[in-house]
């Protein structure tokens, strides 16, 4: 065992040195040759541990993100040679791989639509509209594919102190989302009269998206998947399986395999059934409290004084994605790396008493969303956490006049 540990640590030092050299601008081909000579049988877990180690030693995730494609290229041949255990149908990672396969089919379909548009004399309006709809379908599904990974897979890695690789991958996900939105904007502006002018640029834009996506799919299957397989327990996979159902079918992938979520560890509710919780203005049972919070016309999330998510309401129509895996997760890890600084600022201002509330509003998928953060303090004024309340106020903004008579229609 000691020889194994020493050899593993030796490989970690080699990997760290090679990646550091890459960041300093060393020729990737030279690094690849040295890697092949010095390190045999490297696996995804070791690469992830190396990246985590660099982050722990002070390298910013943004710096690793800049070079992560070079990392993947350098290690791609070795990773591809590693044998992967066959996962049962229905396993979350089996589903992930099927989603990637279906996504690539949609990518090919979009390319065929662009070929069809180019083949028309001035571009068929029907084909252009089909291209727009297929692109929107692709964005909706790839966004959910990434969100499932970010909101379910990543929290479980973080429980095992693996925070660096998820942070880097999430940041790249957001880059892909932005690139795809840019391409969607081009398809919206495309018209039969502008085919010759706009289609070449649209093709280049989509090629860049495609290349980035294929790189991400490789990382998901050859780095993320083995890393999770080597780290998570069966019961954790069962929990992930159960929570994945919240995202529904992605790219029409329907898993009916043998993998079951029967080992889910369920937490028990504190307090005896029917016991009342004494409040300032009354008393409620736990069942009543849960029902009230679940049926509020807003989304509520609570983060405690240690910056850990402790509760979120499960309304009928949630505005933002929340899964049970975020319970106990640091709130900083629940946001894309690019927005963490804003989260940190709000929490720090609340803790110091500099501020006690912060409000935002934005347009999301055609809806107007209001978000308010409120600092919660105990009777002595000590900070005990932050409450986030999100509400779709699209309908409220449109109200006019008065309604004084009962009407159940809306």
Image: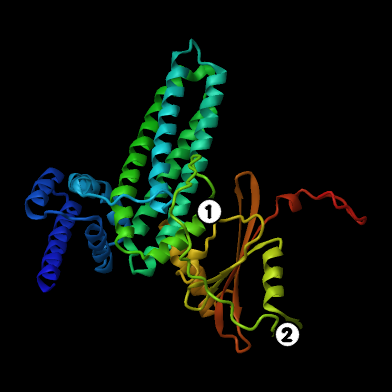
Question: Which quadrant holds residue 357?
Answer: bottom right
Tell me if residue 202 can be seen.
Answer: no
Mark 2 element type? loop
Q: Position of residue 137 (x, y in %)?
A: 53, 36
Q: Which mark is residue 255?
A: none
In this rendering, would 19 be left or right of 219? left
Q: Residue at x 43, y 23 (%)?
A: 112
Which part of the image, by quadrant, shows the N terminus? bottom left
Task: Give how far apart the Cα atoms at labels 2 and 1 are.
Answer: 38 Å
Q: Is residue 356 above or below residue 323?
A: below
Query: Which residue ends up furthest to the left in the rendered image?
Result: 37
In this rendering, would 45 be left or right of 107? left
Q: Which residue is mark 1?
A: 245
Asked whether 7 or 59 is in front, the reply is: 7
Q: Which residue is mark 2?
A: 280
Q: Is residue 45 above or below residue 134?
A: below
Q: Position of residue 18 (x, y in %)?
A: 14, 55
């Amino acid at each position: 065992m000691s020889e194994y540990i020493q050899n593993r640590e030796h490989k970690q030092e080699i990997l760290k040195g090679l990646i550091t050299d890459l960041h300093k601008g060393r020729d990737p081909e030279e690094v690849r040759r040295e890697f092949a000579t010095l390190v045999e049988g490297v696996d995804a877990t070791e690469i992830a541990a190396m990246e985590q180690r660099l982050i722990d030693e002070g390298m910013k995730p943004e710096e690793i993100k800049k070079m992560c494609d070079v990392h993947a290229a350098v290690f791609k041949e070795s990773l591809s040679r590693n044998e992967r255990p066959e996962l049962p149908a229905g396993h979350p990672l089996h589903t992930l791989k099927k989603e990637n396969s279906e996504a690539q089919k949609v990518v090919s379909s979009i390319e065929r639509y662009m070929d069809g548009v180019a083949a028309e004399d001035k571009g068929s309006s029907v084909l252009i509209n089909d291209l727009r709809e297929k692109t929107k379908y692709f964005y909706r599904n790839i966004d959910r594919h990434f969100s499932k990974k970010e909101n379910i897979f990543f929290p479980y890695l973080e429980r095992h102190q693996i925070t660096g690789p998820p942070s880097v991958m999430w940041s790249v996900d957001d880059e892909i989302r932005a690139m795809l939105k840019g391409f969607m904007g081009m398809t919206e502006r495309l018209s039969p009269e502008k085919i010759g002018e706009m289609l070449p640029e649209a093709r280049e834009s989509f090629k860049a998206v495609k290349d980035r996506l294929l790189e991400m799919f490789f990382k998901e299957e050859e780095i993320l998947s083995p890393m999770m397989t080597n780290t998570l327990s069966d019961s954790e996979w069962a929990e992930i399986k159960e929570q994945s159902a919240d995202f529904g079918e992605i790219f029409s992938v329907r898993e009916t395999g043998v993998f079951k979520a029967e080992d889910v560890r369920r937490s028990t509710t504190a307090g005896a059934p029917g016991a009342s919780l004494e409040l300032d203005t009354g008393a409620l049972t736990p069942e009543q409290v849960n029902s009230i919070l679940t049926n509020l016309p807003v989304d509520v999330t609570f983060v405690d004084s240690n910056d850990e998510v402790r509760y979120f309401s499960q309304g009928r129509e949630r505005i933002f994605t929340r899964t049970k895996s975020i319970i106990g997760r640091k709130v900083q890890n629940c946001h894309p790396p690019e927005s963490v600084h804003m989260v940190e600022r709000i929490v720090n201002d609340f803790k110091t008493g500099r501020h006690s509330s912060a409000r935002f509003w934005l347009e999301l998928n055609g809806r107007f969303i209001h978000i308010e953060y409120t600092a919660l303090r105990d009777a002595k004024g000590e900070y005990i956490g932050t409450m986030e309340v999100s509400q779709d106020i699209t309908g409220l903004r449109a109200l006019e006049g008065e309604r004084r008579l009962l009407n159940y229609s809306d």
